[in-house]
Amino acid sequence: MVEGGVRPERIVAEFAAFGSTLVAISPQIQEYNRKLIEEKKLAFELLSDPGNEVAQQFGLKYAFPEDLKKVYLKFGIDLEKYNGDDSWTLPLPARFIIDQDEVVKYAETNVDYTIRP
């Protein structure tokens, strides 16, 4: 279940009803993406973006300052381990609707990862 009690498979079904596909992109290596899919019972694809190359193309790549990196490490969050590189970068949260002709029809990003449409 996600916020509001809506099941992920219902969301995917609603996208499919419009002839659409829902995918998420993460910089995590595939091993951790697979674990996340199983743990959260995700009903959509979770693609891997090594080195945040796709995020970079969309202007969404965020590099951690050294002080924030230290805070993450104190909490046991090691991006090098999960992302498979030492760049200490993450994508800014973003949502895109892209049509079959690869035209971006809608785009939204917010530096606050807790704000999602």
Image (cartoon, rainbow, N blue to C red):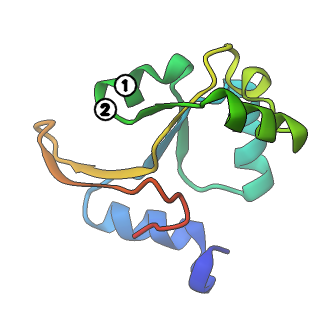
Q: Is residue 88 left or right of residue 36?
A: left
Give the quarter of the image for residue 29.
Answer: top right
Badge 1 crowding class, 10 Å Cα cut-off, few under 14, some 14 to 19, many 20 or more, is few
Q: Report the residue at 39% width, 57% height from top.
A: 110
Secondary structure of the residue carrying tag 1 is: helix
Q: Is residue 17 above or below residue 108?
A: below
Q: In this view, does 113 lie above or below 85?
A: below
The x and y percentages for residue 70 are: 79, 33
User: For residue 56, which numbered disc appears in the image?
Assistant: 1
Q: In this view, does 32 lie to the left or right of 64?
A: right
Residue found at the very far bottom of the displayed protein: 4
Give the quarter of the image for residue 106.
Answer: bottom left
Residue 4 vs residue 72, the one in the foreground: 72
Q: In this view, does 82 lie above or below 93?
A: above
* Residue designated by label 2: 59
The x and y percentages for residue 76 are: 89, 39
Q: Report the residue at 67% width, 74% height from top.
A: 1
The x and y percentages for residue 108 are: 29, 56
Residue 85 vs residue 44, the one in the foreground: 85
User: For residue 30, which numbered disc appears in the image?
Assistant: none
Q: Is residue 38 left or right of residue 85?
A: right
Q: Report the residue at 58% width, 86% height from top.
A: 4
User: Can the viewer see residue 21?
Assistant: no
Q: Do the residues labelled 2 and 1 touch (CB within 8 Å)?
A: yes
Q: Is residue 39 left or right of residue 87?
A: right
In the rendered structure, which amino acid carries the disc numbered 1?
Gln
In the rendered structure, which amino acid carries the disc numbered 2?
Gly
The x and y percentages for residue 98 are: 21, 46
Badge 2 crowding class, 10 Å Cα cut-off, few under 14, some 14 to 19, many 20 or more, is few
User: Can the viewer see residue 113?
Assistant: yes
3D distance between C-alphas at marks 2 and 1: 5 Å
Secondary structure of the residue carrying tag 2 is: loop
